[in-house]
Image: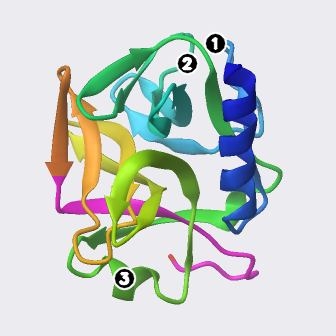
Amino acid sequence: MKPKYILFFSLFVAINSCGDFYWRDYDGSIPSDAIPAENNSKGLSYIGQAYIHNYGLFLGKIIPGNLEISVPCYGVKKINVIIKILCAADKSKYYWISTNRARYRDDTFDKCPVLGGYDQKAKINRKLGTLHVGRTRIEGNVIIGNIAAYDPIHPFFYYPLNDTEIRASEYDVLIYSDNSVLPQ
């Protein structure tokens, strides 16, 4: 029964997004087409997606070789099954912009934030929970998490830190651009 839910959520993410990205099964090795999150103190990290039954698809940081990711989902959930890694044929079409919850709508108005997941428990004005790919830096390490893009007033960024879900007002959002010249 679970594969039907995964298929539905994967189709939702694919249909309701822009860009030429896709999610591959993650088995501990990093595919050559994986989109990096950025260097950490221990090397590159990547963008992971995990399915959580009755909750949806949530985002976390993949560290090469580690088969478990932590995701913010009404607390921190540690997942070691049904993990995907964000990939694209042309990684150069993706870049990060810094923003905050007050500027998020203006900063992304004419851009294409990457849709990374779906929170089926979130209900704001009858809208269910679109999650964009976000990141922050803590003590030299990049942390991946969910931007609550479904919230028109308070699009906070949620991420796991030391087994606690943290809510932040300032963060970076992953953007797709098919323009030949990307902003620096």
Mark in front: 2 vs 3: 3
The amino acid at mark 1 is Gly
| Left or right of 157 on screen, residue 92 | right
Mark-to-mark CA distance, 1 and 2: 6 Å
Q: Specify the amino acid type for callout 3.
A: Arg
Q: Going by the image, does 53 lie left or right of 170?
A: right
- Residue 28, label in figure: 1
Query: Among all residues in the image, which is located at the extreme right?
Result: 89
**Figure quadrant of the N terminus:** top right
Tell me, yes or no, whether the highlighted magenta stretch contains residue 132: no
Residue 181, picture quadrant: bottom right
Q: Nearer the viewer, mark 1 or mark 2?
A: 1
Instruction: Say which element carries label 1.
Output: loop
The residue nearer to you, when weighing 76 against 85, is 76
Residue that appears at 30% across and 72% down: 99
SS at mark 2 in the image: loop
Estimate the spatial distance between the alpha carbons at disc 2 and disc 3, rounded to whole Å. Answer: 33 Å
Which percent across, then down, holds residue 103?
26, 82
| Mark 3 Cα shell of 10 Å, populated few (<14), some (14-19), many (≥20) | some
Q: Is residue 183 left or right of residue 2?
A: left
Q: Earlier in the sequence, mark 3 or mark 1?
A: 1
Question: Viewer-proximal residue, 159 or 4?
Answer: 4
For the residues labelled 1 and 2, say whether their Cβ atoms are less than 8 Å apart: yes
Query: Label 3: which residue?
Result: 105
- Residue topped by disc 2: 64
Residue stretch in magenta? 168-183
Q: Earlier in the sequence, mark 2 or mark 3?
A: 2
Mark 3 element type: helix
Q: Are marks 2 and 3 in contact (CB under 8 Å)?
A: no
Horizontal and vertical percent position of residue 119 = 44, 47
Give above or below for 139 relative to 77: below
Mark closest to the chain's N terminus, 1 or 2: 1
